[in-house]
Amino acid sequence: MATVIKPDLSDVPAYMAGLGHCARSASRVLAAADTAQKNRALLAIAETIKQGQSDLRGANDKDMAAGREKGLDAALLDRLELTDSRIDAMVDGLLQVANLSDPVGAITDMAYRPSGVQVGKMRVPLGVIGIIYESRPNVTVDAAALCLKSGNAVILRGGSESIHSNLALAKSITAGLELAGLPATSVQVVATADREAVAQLLTMREWIDVVIPRGGKSLIERVTADARVPVIKHLDGNCHIYIDDQADFDKAIAIAINSKTHRYGVCNAAESLLIANSVAEKVLPPLAEALLEKGVELRGCDSSRQLVAEIGIATEQDWGTEYLAPIISVKVVKGLDQAIDHIATYGSGHTDVIVTENWSHAQRFLRQVDSSSVMVNASSRFADGYEYGLGAEIGISTDRIHVGVLSD
C-alpha cells in the first residue's frame, strides 16, 4: 500500500525545497541500491499501472475534457491522451528498462599510465534530476524508469494540462517503490500547477544536479534562460527526409509517408522533404499525391511547384520550421552535397534520413550530417528510445557538450 502524503501547497518555495531535500536523501539510497532491487521496483511499478489502468484512464479523461474546454489543438490533445495501447506501451517500456544492463558501476577504458597507475572510467549516478515537460503523461513513467535504473532520484513537473494523469501515475510509481523497499521519494511528481514551482526547481542548486526540459520551444527557451543548474536540452525537431538520386522509389515513398503522417504532433515526424533533381520528376508527383490524399499541405521551391501544381509557395521561414501539423516543406536539390548543406543550414540536429541504395552516399550522409539520429532507409519515427530497444527516453539532446581545459 502506497504512502499518501498531502503536501502543503500554500507555500510553493517551502514545498519545493521539501521535495529537493527528500530527493537528495533518496538519491543516496538509490546510488547504493543493487540491480535486483531497482529491477524489482520497475516490475512492481509496471504491475501497479496494469492493475490501476481503469483509474488511470479516468484521470486522463478529466485532463482530456479540460483540454478540450481550454481549446487545446489536435496535436496537444493527441500527446495528452492515454489510450489502452499507450498504457500497454508504458508497461512494456518498464519491462525493457528492467532488462537492460545496469549502467551504475560499469568500469571501462582501464589502462596503465607511464607512472604505473591504472586509470579508467566508472559510471556513477548524477544524483537528483529535475525534469520539466508538457502534455505527455507517458513521460512521467519513462523518466521514472530511466532515473531509477541509473540510480538517480527525480523530481517531475508535468504540464498543468496533464496533472490528473501524472498524479495518478505517481501513485502507481510510489506503490512500486515501496514494494521494492526503495524510498517513496525516489520519484516525486510536483503536485501543483503553479508556475512558481518551475522557477524554484530551476534555481535549487543545493538539491538539483541537472534539469532536463521536454516540450515546446518556448518551454525549453525559458528553462535555458532561467536555470541556475546545468541543463540538457533539445529545441526543434525539424527532421529531414532526403531522397537520393539512387533511391528505391517505392521504399522512398513509403518512408516519407510514414515519417510525415504516422503522427503529426511529435518531434520525430518529418517536416522537410529533399529530393535529388535527377529523380524529382519521377518520385515527387506520386509522393505528393499520396501526401495530399492524407490531408498534408505541401510548401515547396519553384522546381517542386513546376512538377506538382498543388504545392504552395515555401518561404525562407518554412525551411527551418517544425510544424507539428500536417504540413511539409519540399525542396528539389542538385544532389547529396546540396542536401547536406541544406540540413546544416536549416536543420535542428534531431533526426535526418537518407533514402538510397548507394553505400558510399549513405556513408557520407552518416558522417557529415551532425544530428542526434542519422538514418539510412528508415522512417524518422524510429528515433525513439522505445524503438531503439532502450525502453524509454527523456528526450533527444541536440546539445554539444565539450571538454575544456582551463589554465592560468
Image: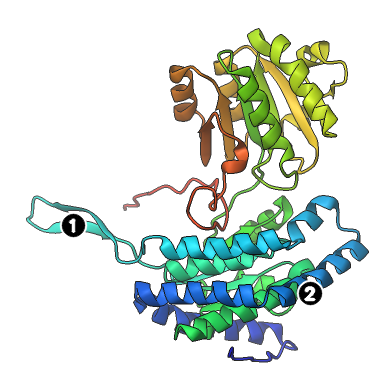
Relative horizontal placement of residue 200, taking residue 315 as reference (left or right): left
User: How far separated are the C-alphas under marks 1 and 2?
Assistant: 54 Å
Counting residues from the start of the chain, the first of labels 1 and 2 encountered is 2
Residue 377 drawn at (x, y percent) = 55, 28
Name the residue carrying label 2. 58
Q: 299 or 175: which is nearer to us?
A: 175
**Is residue 118 in view from this perspective?**
yes
Looking at the rendered structure, which numbered label has been put on residue 119? 1
Q: Residue at x 64, y 47 (%)?
A: 235
Residue 143 drawn at (x, y percent) = 56, 65
Quarter of the image where one finds residue 46: bottom right
Q: Residue at x 86, y 53 (%)?
A: 73
Residue type, mark 2 in image: Gly
**Tag nearer the camera, 1 or 2:** 2
Look at the numbered disc 2 and give the secondary structure of its residue: helix
Looking at the rendered structure, which numbered label has been put on residue 94? none
**Crowd rating for badge 1 (residues with CA inside 10 Å; few <14, some 14–19, many 20+):** few
Quarter of the image where one finds residue 398: top right
Residue type, mark 1 in image: Val
In contact (CB < 8 Å): disc 1 and disc 2? no
Relative horizontal placement of residue 277, taking residue 404 as reference (left or right): right
Q: Does 395 appear above or below 51?
A: above
Look at the numbered disc 1 and give the secondary structure of its residue: strand
Q: Residue at x 70, y 83 (%)?
A: 12
User: From the image, which quarter does the N terminus lie in?
Assistant: bottom right
Q: Does 315 appear above or below 276?
A: below
Residue 130 drawn at (x, y percent) = 57, 69
